[in-house]
């Protein structure tokens, strides 16, 4: 089952470039990046370390502004989209508040966004269960392993039901089993809701398994060099990973990556 | 069914429940002594201190106007406590110290917040701060007495000046310690300035703010006493001064011990506040 897509793209990035610093320290992180994402898509960004994946995600999330080019979300500026709280962001590091326990960390966006207090417990409980941390709600971040901290960060991004999820290697710190389980859970959330996801990963199999399209990025210049559509049918399961179509797509992405 | 009468001695024996509570209390007491061993050393160290004190007097044969016997100091303390004399002076010194502390809390933290947020402003202000910091407080304390008279105000000002800079620096460093990623997270929620302050900056800076408050409270006592020493007719510093004028060493010692106890109480309450506000945080991060 493919999700219904709107005619107008939800994210529209045109000719973005981003430079950091100046003079001899100048780094061109992104050059001529174009990307259109339809509502309800699941786009993976894959590419070598330092090619600008995190930077691109931060431009879309309006955490930094591009040097040139335009980025629009839902036909408005990214700044407006941020003000409208369209984004849930999972950073590459967990970025938890060390003075709050797990529950209170997940409550943070609800508190900031003024969600009625009566809804907090139920919503947080649902997320805790999703990421498998029901028994750790009163633990503090320093009492958790790196992977558990990252799962808290995922729960915190999902709890306010954003329409766009920007995820920067969210499962990088997880063991293989938990990772596969989280992949399925993410797909589950994705098919149940009409969320649009931009997902940075270093794992080709993961990108193919999850996405509707995989955007392959190259280094110097940091840009999107290939876009591989993934036409694996939904819903996907462990069996999907056994099909020949899946293997062909993994090979296709691998070759696109190798071209540099 | 006929209920059997209870044996007459039943009430004399402790019930099973009572035995087990007593046993568990006893186990807890032993655990407490084991875990909090350092606290049980305190009375021991006090006894050792007094014994050493007496030993010095015995072996060196100091007269009372050089070093009084511990008993003389104790008697003096009992006298000033019984006639309420000491409480007047304690209240006076505490009032000065707390005024100085509160003023510093207000000004040092708000200025520290502004300077912590803006590197440009901090650069502009830093020559003045360094210059002001290098003024010896003891040197200008007499001036402050001359300008503001003999009352509470000049001593509160001296206390304020002594603790202002440590509290200012702690606030600046505390605000700077806010992690940039955490700011970005709040930005992604489109949080207001007030929300960033109350949910992120304040709690992140809290450990350093509280460290500043702890030092500030203890040192504000010192500032007030220095001021009293230089002029005025009341307060613990004045009592020390009076004692030395009269060569009444027991009075000097009694005043000093009172100062130590009050300072410890202030420091201890700040530490308790700290423990409560930093609950759950990693110990070594505090
Ligand atoms: N704030 C910054 N200041 C200066 N340079 C930066 C900054 N952020 C990123 N860069 C540079 O931009 C380039 C792209 O960085 P980015 O973090 O986007 O890479 P990435 O693709 O996410 O890498 P990784 O897979 O290792 O996370 C790098 O060369 C990096 O040094
Ligand atoms: Mg990155």
Image (cartoon, coloured by chain):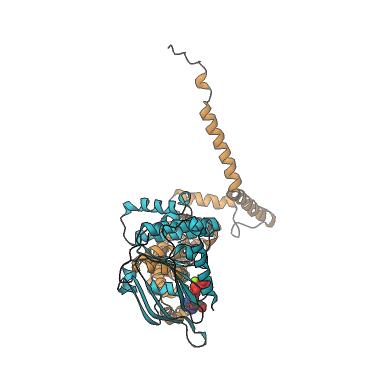
Chain colours: A cyan, B orange
Q: Position of residue B125 (x, y in %)?
A: 42, 80
Of B123 and A127, the residue lying toward us: A127
- Left or right of A3? Residue B50 is right
Residue A209: x percent and y percent? Answer: 47, 62
Above or below, comparing residue A158 to residue A54 in the picture:
above
**Location of residue A225 in the rendering, given as x and y in whole percent from the top left corner:** 47, 78
Q: On the image, which quarter does residue A236 sit in? A: bottom left
Q: Quadrant of residue A233?
A: bottom left
Closest to the observer, A256 or A190: A256
Residue A141 visible, this angle: no
**Camera sees residue A211:** yes
Query: Which x, y percent locates residue A190?
Result: 39, 60
Quarter of the image where the N terminus of chain B is located: top left
Count of labels in the image: 0
The foreground one among A177 and B223 is: A177
Find the residue positioned furthest to the front: A244
Which residue is farthest top?
A: B2
Kindly give the residue lying farthest to the right in the view shown. Answer: B59
Of residues B37 and A214, the one nearer the viewer is A214
């Amino acid at each position: 089952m493919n999700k219904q897509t709107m005619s107008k793209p939800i994210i529209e990035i045109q000719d973005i470039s981003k430079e950091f610093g100046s003079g001899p320290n100048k780094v061109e992180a992104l050059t001529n990046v174009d990307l259109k994402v339809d509502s309800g898509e699941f786009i993976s960004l894959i590419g070598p370390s330092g090619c600008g994946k995190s930077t691109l995600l931060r431009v879309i999330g309006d955490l930094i502004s591009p040097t040139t080019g335009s980025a629009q979300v839902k036909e408005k500026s990214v700044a407006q989209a941020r003000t409208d709280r369209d984004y849930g962001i999972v950073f590459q590091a967990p970025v938890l508040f060390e003075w709050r326990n797990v529950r209170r960390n997940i409550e943070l966006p609800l508190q900031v966004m003024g969600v009625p207090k009566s809804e907090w417990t139920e919503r947080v409980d649902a997320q805790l269960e999703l990421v498998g941390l029901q028994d750790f709600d009163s633990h503090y971040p320093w009492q958790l392993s790196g992977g558990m901290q990252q799962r808290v960060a995922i729960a915190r991004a999902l709890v306010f039901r954003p329409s766009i999820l920007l995820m920067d290697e969210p499962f990088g710190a997880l063991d293989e089993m938990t990772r596969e389980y989280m992949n399925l859970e993410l797909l589950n959330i994705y098919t149940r809701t009409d969320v649009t996801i931009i997902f940075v990963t270093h794992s080709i199999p993961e990108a193919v398994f999850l996405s509707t399209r995989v955007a392959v990025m190259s280094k110097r210049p940091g840009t999107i060099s290939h876009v591989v559509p993934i036409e694996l049918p939904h819903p996907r399961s462990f069996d999907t990973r056994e099909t020949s179509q899946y293997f062909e797509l993994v090979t296709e992405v691998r070759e696109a990556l190798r071209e540099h | 069914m006929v209920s059997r009468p209870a044996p007459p001695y039943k009430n004399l024996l402790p019930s099973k429940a009572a035995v087990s509570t007593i046993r568990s209390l006893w186990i807890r007491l032993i655990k407490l002594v084991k875990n909090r061993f350092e606290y049980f050393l305190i009375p021991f160290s006090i006894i050792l201190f007094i014994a050493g004190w007496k030993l010095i007097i015995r072996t060196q044969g100091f007269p009372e106007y050089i070093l009084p016997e511990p008993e003389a100091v104790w008697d003096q303390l009992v006298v000033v406590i019984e006639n309420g004399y000491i409480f007047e002076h304690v209240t006076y010194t505490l009032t000065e110290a707390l005024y100085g502390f509160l003023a510093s809390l207000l000004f040092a933290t708000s200025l520290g917040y502004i300077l912590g947020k803006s590197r440009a402003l901090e650069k502009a202000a830093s020559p003045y701060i360094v210059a002001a910091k290098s003024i010896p407080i003891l040197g200008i304390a007499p001036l402050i007495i001359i300008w503001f008279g003999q009352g509470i105000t000049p001593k509160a000002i001296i206390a304020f000046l002594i603790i202002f800079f440590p509290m200012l620096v702690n606030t600046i460093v505390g605000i700077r310690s806010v992690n940039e990623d955490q700011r970005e997270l709040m930005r992604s929620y489109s949080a207001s300035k007030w929300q960033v302050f109350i949910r992120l900056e304040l709690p992140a800076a809290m450990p350093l703010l509280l460290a500043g408050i702890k030092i500030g409270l203890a040192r504000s006592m010192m500032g007030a006493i220095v001021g009293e020493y230089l002029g005025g007719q009341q307060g613990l510093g004045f009592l020390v001064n009076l004692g030395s004028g009269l060569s009444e060493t027991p009075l000097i010692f009694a005043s000093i011990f009172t100062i130590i106890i009050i300072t410890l109480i202030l420091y201890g309450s700040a530490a308790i506040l700290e423990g409560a506000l930093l609950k759950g945080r990693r110990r070594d991060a505090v």
